[in-house]
Amino acid sequence: MSNRIVVDPVTRIEGHLRIEAKVENGKIVDAFSSSTMVRGIEIIMKGRDPRDAWAFVQRVCGVCTTIHALASVRAVEDAVGIVVPPNAELIRNIMNATLYIHDHVVHFYHLHALDWVDVVSALKADPKKTSELAQSISSYPKSSVGYFSDLQKRLQKFVDSGQLGIFANGYWGHKQPHGSRTLPRSPRMAKRNCENSRHLRRQKPASELPCGRCAVFYQH
Amino acid sequence: MLPNLFDDTVFAEKKQMSLREEIQSRGYSRREFMNFCAFMAAGMGLEMSAAAQIAKALDTKARPPMVWFHFQECTCCSESFIRSTHPIVADILLDKISLDYSQTLQAAAGFQAEEALRHTMEKYKGEYIMLVEGAVPEGADGVYCCIAGKTSLDIVKEAAENAKAIIAWGSCASAGCIQMAKPNPTQARPIHKVLPGKTIVRVPGCPPIGEVMAGVVVHLLAFDRIPQLDSQGRPLAFYSRRIHDTCYRRPNYDAGLFVETFDDPNAKKGYCLYKVGCKGPTTYNACAVTGWNGGTSFPIKSGHPCIGCSEDNFWDNGPFYQHLAAFPGFGIESTADTIGITAAAATAAGVALHAVATNVRKKKMIHDVEDPLKAELKEIDREERIAERKAARNGSGNGANNSSTDSDTKGAQ
């Protein structure tokens, strides 16, 4: 028996994407992806001043903006044979590295995390066990039982309000690679991290970063 | 104008948390909440007494449902919004408005996502706020932008029908932006062109400043109506002054000190960028006042001319690095001498957002009004002192990390 599954829109990406999958006997046998939006920036670029190219190309994506601009500038330079001085190269590297750090946080916490963190299921978690787990993997100062209990109460209020906002109607609880299974008591920890990511972007000293991978980049 | 945007009776059936309760439930203190209100009032160019009004409104209003559409765009508006400097802006406006549909942030995808949208549009008919990011292509019957099998043209018309307010984020939704640049291959249109007769708040910029976006939303929440708009539908508070008149390099322009090329000594000295293509003289925006990234900088401060991204058709207004004399529309000299002088006189040298508060037109009102905000802050001070004394009397507490989150989530002030 053959079936077709369509996912449109695919959310938490930049842009518009549609996925169609052909399913036979519970297995995907074929799949198609299509981008459902086009702006024609390539056509618009034709005949423009090459010095302006970076600004046009940058608008391909507002999430990973800088890298498009840098690549475009390099392409123009290559085309007309410009060699940039080492200081310019260094500044560009700094810009690229800054984007890398920033994008890592945005992508991970705002975009990617909801694929495997069922936020609402944190209500069922045990604050004591969560605290033990958190303390066993890092010295992050907010890993106390009290902190997790407070967080659970806040979440309960949010859920009780009946307006789940961006968390509404999510496809939660699948048994496959999903937070609730791979990280047994961690949904609440993950939510904590999500909440902190916004503060972290501006305020957290490196030692307080909840995510080990980010910390590596933040320490000079 | 929109009468009574958030009728309380709509939400009466459910006991919802007010925004203030939610802010506090997220670990912010009352002081931080009041400071946030002052910050927002200052950003909107309102007198300080408005801060108390904002505080009161946020205290009593429940969360309005909002749907955020993405059409022909690059998501830079969303990015700018979630990078709003003030931590409460990000927390509250992103999570605590009920953002029921947002392709960039919501957990659900595909059918579930569309169902959430339909649910909001039916249940909160006439009550939801519609936020649009991106232009709408009309070419080939609109197939250049489709979501869930529907064209953006159909989606925007359907959603606008029962929306209480419509906000066009960024230059794409409010002016067409890059996809509308010549030759406009997809026949892209800003949303006010496809929604004739609707009142639309246009918030141009590529992207708009995060604090400006937050200011527009807070205004909607706090005052039950859209902010005062100019003749082009832009919020007056943020788009009434030219970059040129608020620019800290303006004295260089007046003195005839110009950067001639990007590698000349004048560039290092921070002279005026007018001759290397700065579009500041024809651009209306708040960049030079609020700055970007928490007031850290803005393009001119970083040594790059303004490209005029908040103006209509800025992509086609000549190459970015070309002298403005060839600019279509009114000439620079006349405006610099006439419009410029009065506005420049009113502009403080400081660019910190806090300075805006002292910079508003009704300056003396600040002194006249017995400021309820200050009274509130004083009271908080007093309570804190009492609490400190109590704590000192009870000996040093041992649970510094325990349940208190206030110290960890301190705002940026």
Image (cartoon, rainbow, N blue to C red):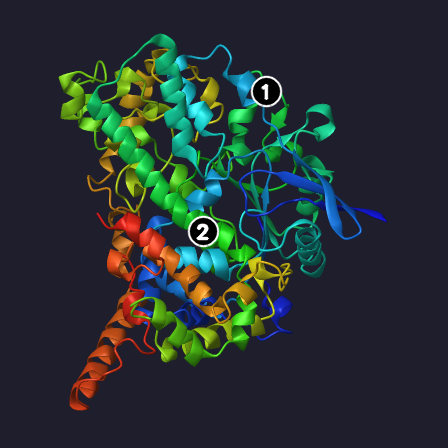
Q: Residue at x 77, y 47 (%)?
A: A23
Circles 2 and 1: CB distance less than 8 Å? no
Q: Are marks 2 and 1 on the same chain?
A: no
Q: Residues within 10 Å of mark 1 (few under 14, many from 20)?
A: many
Q: Which residue does the numbered mark 2 point to in the structure image?
A: A108
Q: Which residue does the numbered mark 1 point to in the structure image?
A: B184
On the image, the x and y values in percent for residue A103 come to 40, 44
Amino acid carrying label 1: it is Asn
Spatial separation of the CA atoms under disc 2 and disc 1: 35 Å
Chain under callout 1:
B
Q: Check disc 2 and report its element: helix, strand or loop.
A: helix
On the image, the x and y values in percent for residue B122 come to 72, 57
On the image, the x and y values in percent for residue B23 come to 42, 67
On the image, the x and y values in percent for residue A88 come to 24, 24
Q: Nearer the viewer, residue A2 or A144?
A: A2
Q: Is residue A147 left or right of residue B196?
A: left
Q: Nearer the viewer, residue A24 or B227?
A: A24
Q: Is residue B132 left or right of residue B380?
A: right
